[in-house]
Image (tube, helix red, strand yellow):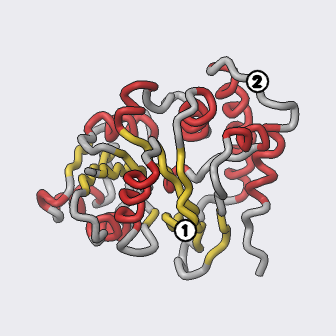
Amino acid sequence: MKISIVTAAYNSATTIRDTIESVLSQDYPDIEYIVVDGASKDGTVEILKSYGNRIRWISEKDGGIFYAMNKGVEMATGDAVGIIGSDDFYPNNQVISKVAKAFQESNADSVYGDLHYVNNKDVTKIERNWKSGSYKRSKFLNGWMPPHTAFFLKKKIYDTYGLYIATMPNASDYELMLRMLYKHHVSSYHIPEVLMKMRNGGNSNDSLKKRITANKEDRNAWKINGLSPKWYTLYAKPISKLLQWVVK
C-alpha cells in the first residue's frame, strides 16, 4: 500500500530538515511526502526547494495548522495518511514499514502507536512517555485519545467522514479522532512501539492558557458530534497527560 505523510510548516527552518530526513530515510518503498508551508519567511522554503522532487510541497498563506493539514490530506494520493509535525521526527527508519504491515495484517482502517516527547534542546532526553495501549472504544469516556502524530488513517475514511475542523485550533486533532473512532466506529490497531518523537516547546503560561481553551474545544467536540461524555471525561483527559511525564 502507498502511505502519504503530511507536514504542516510555518517558519520551521531550525527543525524541518530533521523532519524531512526522518521521512526520506524510511525503508518503506512507497511513500508520498507532502509539506504544506504557510508562506514562511525564515528560510523554510529554501530548505524545501533543496530537496527537488523528493517531496511535494506548496507555500502559501493559510488559516493555521489544521487548514494546512487539510490541504495536505486533500493532496494525498496514498491509501493511508499520517501526520508529522515540522519539529517532529521518526525514531528509526522502519516506522512506516511497521505501519503498512499493521494495516495489511489487521485489515483495520486506522493504526496508531506510542509517542515520546523529547527535550527541545537535547532530543535524546525523554520528558513525556505517551503509551497508548490497545484500542477500546470505551476508553474515550475515560479521557483517552491516541497521539495524533502517531495516528495513521486510511484516505477513504477521510473521504467518507471528513477532514479536520480547522476552526478548533487546540482540539481539532481530538475532535477528528473522536469522530472517526468513537462516533463512526472506525476500526483501529495499536502498534506497541514508539512511532514518533516530538519536541517539547512553549512556556508553561502559554500551555496553561491553551489547555483551558482546548478543554472548552474538547467539550464542543462531543457536542457537535451529538455525543455525550461522562461527567468526568473531560477532567480525566488532562490528568492522563500529567501521568505521561517522566519523573527524573
How far across and how far down the image is residue 76, in percent?
27, 41
Disc 1 on helix, strand or loop?
A: strand
Q: CA distance from mark 2 to mark 1?
A: 31 Å
**SS for dot 2:** loop
- The circle on residue 122 is none
Q: Earlier in the sequence, mark 2 or mark 1?
A: 1
Closer to the camera in the image, 108 or 54: 108
* Image location (x, y in percent) of residue 89: 43, 67
In the figure, residue 184 lies in which quadrant? top right
Q: Is residue 9 shown to the viewer in this render?
A: no
Q: Nearer the viewer, residue 33 or 168?
A: 33
* Residue corresponding to mark 2: 228
> Residue at 59% across / 65% down in the picture?
200
Q: Disc 1 marks which residue?
A: 193
- How many numbered dots are placed on residues in this image? 2
Bin the neighbour count of mark 1 within 10 Å (Cα to Cα): few under 14, some 14-19, many 20 and up.
some
Residue 84 placement, left or right of 112: left
Q: Residue at x 20, y 56 (%)?
A: 55
Q: Which amino acid lies under the numbered mark 2 shown in the image of this protein?
A: Ser
